[in-house]
Amino acid sequence: MKKLTYIYILILAVLFGACEDEAEKVIISSNPVGPTLTGPGADGMEFVKADAANTIEYSWSMSDYGFDASVTYYVQIAMDETFSGSANLVSSQESNGSAVIGDINGILLSWGLPIDEQATIKCRVFSTVNANVDTIFSEVTDFTVTPYETLIDYPMIYVPGAYQGWSPGADNGRLYSYGFNSVYEGILRIVEGANPTSSFKVTPEANWDNAWGGVLTAAGSVFTGALDPSGADYTIDAGTYFVTVDVSALTIELEKTDDWGIIGDATPNGWSDPDTDMMYNGQRQVWEITTDLTDGFLKFRANDDWGVNYGDNEPDGTIDGSGSDIPVTAGNYTIRLDLNNEKYELIEN
């Protein structure tokens, strides 16, 4: 009788194990069918600034892996077919989803696409199950987009110092993470009156709760150092610098760069030195000033010197090296010099 009981137990164990093996076995199709983007239509990503709070609706056919699975779909955009630097707009387990137009526009601006100019971007949808199942991508669809001007809310850190009143959070003294990562950049005029040197620190927030200091090492026009939470004030030769701070690597680098201003009989100082200084607007990544102008002309100059200067030969808003004087009529203007895109703006207030 005892032997018979053992036989029954052995049979049950074999049968139960077989059921378990069958339950764990998943048959994946040798030719799975991927998703296809079905919407929006060809001009479905054209928008204007007034549409910022609206959404664009995306739809797609669902993937078939050959078995029942929990599938997640993503709508992805990029500047080219490689999808390097791509951005995901939608994540959904349904066959549709939406993205806010203002968010899409922010991505386009972060890619450096020119404002108010049409551009073609790439779009696709892909599906995923888990790490053991290959991702399936749809074919790529082209869409025409026209980015509109808006300010991107980049992460910031701060560089308070004697040059700006030791004020963390002040407009003058901000660095921005254009890649939304640990690297922060910007151009700062670190000049304290007539002093040959100036001091500063770095703070991760707009307060003094935490601050980095240390010692800078000079190599030509470049100064480098470490971010030390117990370090003393950094000290540097007075000047204008392109500043890079990596809060993960705990490093700082400052490289001397051009300092820009306006000159001309339309400007406050006329054609005489010094130029009327502009300030670098790190959020817009342009040199900027708001000032009163009179009837006359102006040009842009680097470092209060004619060695590097810009005018406009048309004028058409595009800067030309050593170009013609730019005519203006009297008024209060916000003036922006965009060296990255080689253009300028005169906005009457």
Image (cartoon, helix red, strand yellow):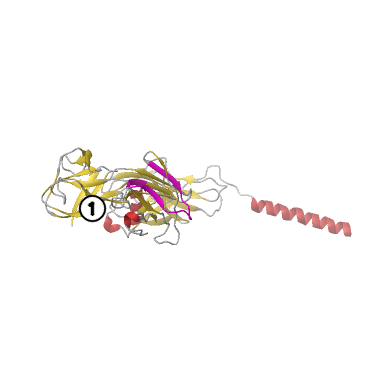
Between residue 2 and residue 292, name the one nearer to us.
Answer: 292
Q: Residue furthest right?
A: 1
- Between 165 and 16, the residue placed more toward the observer is 165
Residue 329 % position (x, y): 11, 51
The part of the image, by quadrant, that contains residue 340 is: top left
Up-down relation of residue 96 to residue 318 (above or below): below
Q: Find the residue positioned furthest to the front.
A: 195
The quadrant of the picture occupied by the C terminus is: bottom left
Label 1: which secondary element: strand
Residue 146 seen in the figure: no
Foreground residue among 9 and 236: 236
Q: Position of residue 221 (x, y in %)?
A: 36, 40
Asked whether 226 falls inside the magenta stretch, the response is yes
Q: Count of labels shown?
A: 1
Indicate left or right for 328 with 21 as reference.
left
At label 1, which amino acid type do we have? Ile
Q: Percent from the top left, x then y, of residue 147?
A: 29, 50
Residue 46 appears at what percent x and percent y?
Answer: 29, 51
Q: What residue is shown at x 30% (from left), y 44% (from top)? A: 119
Bounds of the magenta segment:
222-242
Residue position for label 1:
289
Q: Main secondary structure of the magenta part?
A: strand
Whether residue 17 can be seen here: yes
Tell me what residue is drawn at x 25 percent, y 46 percent: 260
Q: Report which quarter residue 316 is drawn in.
A: top left
